[in-house]
Amino acid sequence: MKTAAQYEESLRRLNLKVYLQGELVENPVDHPIIRPSMNSVKATYALAEDPQYEDLMTAISHLTGKKINRFCHLHQNTEDLVKKVKMQRLLGQKTGACFQRCVGMDAINAVDSVTFEMDLKLGTNYHERFVKFLTRIQEEDWTVDGAMTDPKGDRSLAPSQQEDPDLYVHVVEKREDGIVVSGAKAHQTGALNSHWILVMPTMAMRKSDADYAVSFTAPADAEGIIYIYGRQSCDTRKLEGGNIDVGNKQFGGHEALMVFDKVFIPWENVFMCGEYEFSSSLVERFAGYHRQSYGGCKVGVGDVLIGAAALAADYNGASKASHIKDKLIEMVHLNETLYACGIACSAEGHKTASGTYLIDLLLANVCKQNVTRFPYEIARLAEDIAGGLMVTMPSEKDLHHPEIGKVVKKYFKGIASVPTEHRMRILRLVENLTLGTAAVGYRTESMHGAGSPQAQRIMISRQANLEHKKELARTIAGIPTK
């Protein structure tokens, strides 16, 4: 396994083409806006080195028998599925941000079972190719970016009907030695902190969309791939040189638009090419795994936000008020409900044909449906408890100013025993999680990540087995079966 230092050094060797605020970034690793997100991924390596977290952060490879980072592991039983969720909660607690490796872990588990079933039915050798790639992932301890979401263009039109064919990633040429692809993937979490990109189709494809039913892997710095870094609320505070106003100085997340401009992919790295009838299974399984993930990562970040709100109440001198206690209880109740769904869909998982375990899809979709709502209420309650000062405070430069600093310290003090700076720091953390850079992962990603709310409702409808429930009611009511 890589150490945290080795991981950082491996990123420095990549030749990524990254644009941020209209400029080509020469050194993404040390760029002040990008660096906190790299620190979050680095934590997944650092915690794996720590003996006290070994059980959650590592696993034994079913391919090699070696100890590997759990993010490179295929789930071999329900215990693995449960440990995944617990690991994600731990990392959310440690970083207070998106740690970015979940998408790749969910992608490799989905691609594994689907390629196995493709080979069984079609006689292809996609699974053999995938296993070779997975072995390299485990040996090198790579961070993999799972790339599913396309820009989509006009949502009322299928991929092949778009005016611009590149609005979905597609095959533009098939050669004897591989394929050439063009298009883009949007909202790519942690792309610049990844070694490899694992591309999957974004939706169920029809025969007319066969060129868009493609799955492959490519080095993150492959020729023809460029990245356009996404803006986050309050992101330029990282350029100011301070460490209070950013809310979370050390950790963060990022997203980027990933563009493929006639990128060559050798056949050994292609896992689907035109088998449109299997695209829906790949999308469904990846989405299910990722919806499970949100029952871990969002809960860990929620733990941080609940702690910050409780500290704000302490510093405000309001912690003994009954309504404050009740709001904190409600925050914990909502957060643990999310966790319960993540654990439940894991414990109810089952074995696929390839041997990899899949979560219970109904419960995973219920988990994510709750995630589209509960973090928003937790954030609302945190803002309620924190108070208006959270968004009206002067800057840390004012706090440290030789003349007006003493005024800031005097008038923004809460209880006498807590320094004004400490109060400001915790309020900025609440702001970061609810309105700032971390709100991308905690709020809006909770709504749209792993599919927007309607996507889960569709899956809940498919998985609900209403006919069975009707039969249960008929039997108890004494109504004869038709």
Image (cartoon, rainbow, N blue to C red):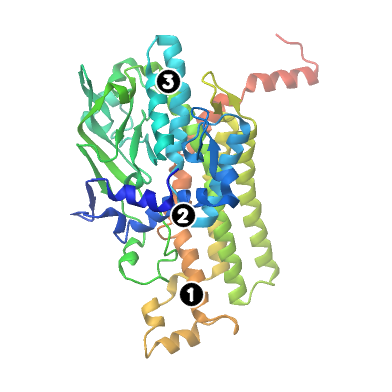
Residue labelled with disc 2 = 97
Three-letter code for the amino acid on which mark 3 is drawn: Thr
Question: What residue is rendered at 41% in x and 86% in y?
Answer: 405
For residue 424, the mark is 1
Res 101 → quadrant: top left
The label nearer to you, 1 versus 3, is 3
Question: What residue is rendered at 55% in x and 38% in y?
Answer: 59
Label 2: which secondary element: loop
The label nearer to you, 2 versus 3, is 3
Quadrant of the rendering where the C terminus is positioned = top right
Residue 173: x and y, percent?
Answer: 19, 21
Residue labelled with disc 3 = 115
Q: Is residue 370 visible?
A: no
Mark 1 or mark 3, which has the lower sequence index?
A: 3
Quadrant of the rendering where the N terminus is positioned = top left
In the image, taking residue 240 as reference, residue 287 lies left or right, namely right
Residue 350: x and y, percent?
Answer: 60, 25
Res 464 → quadrant: top right
Residue 404: x and y, percent?
Answer: 39, 88
Three-letter code for the amino acid on which mark 2 is drawn: Ala
- CA gap, disc 2 and disc 3: 32 Å
Which of 268/453 is in front? 268
- CA gap, disc 1 and disc 3: 52 Å
